[in-house]
Image (cartoon, rainbow, N blue to C red):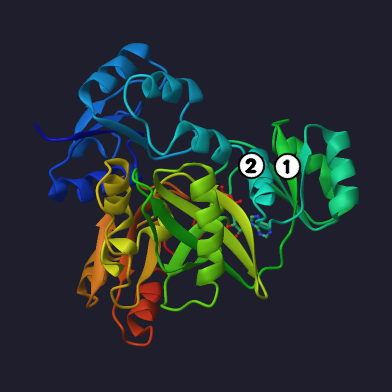
Amino acid sequence: MSTRVGVLGGGQLARMLALAGYPLGLEFVFLCPVRDACAAPLGEHLCADFEDEAALRHLAAKVDRVTYEFESVPAGAVAYLDDKVPVYPPPQALATARDRLHEKSLFNELGIETAPFMAVDGLADLQRAVAKIGLPAILKTRTLGYDGKGQQRLHDAADLNAAWEGIHGAAAILEGFVPFEREVSIIAVRSLSGELAFYPLSENHHQAGILQLSTSLPDDPMQGLAEDYAQRLLEHLDYVGVLAIEFFQLGGRLLVNEMAPRVHNSGHWTIEGAETSQFENHLRAILGLPLGITALVGRPGMVNLIGGLPDIDAILRLPGAHLHLYGKTPRPGRKLGHVTVCTDDGGESLQRLLALTAGQGDETA
Ligand SMILES: Nc1ncnc2c1ncn2[C@@H]1O[C@H](COP(=O)(O)OP(=O)(O)O)[C@@H](O)[C@H]1O
Ligand SMILES: [Mg+2]
């Protein structure tokens, strides 16, 4: 009987995990409350709430391992499953990563730099935090934030009330604004046997808080420091699976922004742009298989398709372009797919791809 992997969530990350798992002979069961979940056509879909005990019991009975595609899966569901079937990445890592205050405190404990931050649980806290950290700054909800959601930027003292109201009284942190030169991320992986592997750094560009472009070049000068920080986290958390870590680069320093205990959008280029994709290595790691080589193939660049689709024929005509559509209905700000080029032509293909995708999904376009 083939090995079955259970995935909490049925979005594009779950879908790409399954696409990577089929060549390895794996089968997939997705637990996701969304009826038309985009991973559903790739395996068995248990369409139920994450806290539905019957569905959780059913899932645990069917699969050999459980993993998840997003940090906000209810802790109770993970604890229930972990009693019955191994869940990786380990629930303790999930608990840390889902809360910005916990994760940033851990980074600092392990000697990893971050922007200055303080917990904020009310307007008085916010005033104290601004007095200490200064402006500009960003107020972020501790949990449930993604794609820039749950964030308010503060430029001057008049912004405090509106920012506090803007996050609807959620437990939050205030973070100093980092005038970074670059945003980079590392996709790191640790297997059940403790084997480690690191992908070459991604350089990331965001628009309105949403990742738009990731590229990767060999021999990034910050590679060594990023790997050192990633290794401290992987070993401290006794981690199993892919861990993505986002950094701000400021001179020769890397300040950690956040970590994600899962496969990550800034690693989508690894599907064609690395010897082994992040999705395959995540599966290998959680199943206790040897990890695959993480070396680059060509010069990868990945562009997200957000909100609307570009001229698909034109994309497909672009030599070396790899199109991934997630089968989702267009909506402003929604990630509908991505395109990767790996051609070593001095960035020409990437420039053509960027021109073809420019302005897609802009509500004004
Ligand atoms: N302290 C900061 N200083 C400067 N830019 C920031 C800061 N925090 C976030 N950003 C910008 O906003 C983006 C999204 O913030 P992030 O904390 O990564 O939230 P999310 O969980 O939504 O990805 C970052 O990639 C970065 O471009
Ligand atoms: Mg982020």
Residue at 44% across, 39% down: 70
Task: Name the image quarter holding residue 239.
Answer: top left
Q: Residues within 10 Å of mark 1 (few under 14, many from 20)?
A: many
Q: Tell me: 263 left or right of 327.
A: right
Q: Residue furthest left?
A: 1
Residue type at mark 2 is Arg
Q: Position of residue 25 (x, y in %)?
A: 12, 43
Q: Which residue is mark 1?
A: 173
Secondary structure of the residue carrying numbered label 1: strand
Residue 306 in the image, given as x and y percentages of width and height: 42, 56
Residue depicted at x 61% and y 37%:
99
Disc 2 C-beta below 8 A from ligand 1: yes
For the residue marked with disc 1, what is the amino acid? Ile
Instruction: Give whichever of 243, 340 is nearer the camera.
Output: 243
Rendered location of residue 64, percent (x, y)? 24, 30
Q: Is residue 152 left or right of residue 51?
A: right
**Disc number at residue 100?**
2
Residue 179 seen: yes
Tag 2 and tag 1, C-beta contact below 8 Å = yes
In the image, residue 174 above or below residue 143:
below
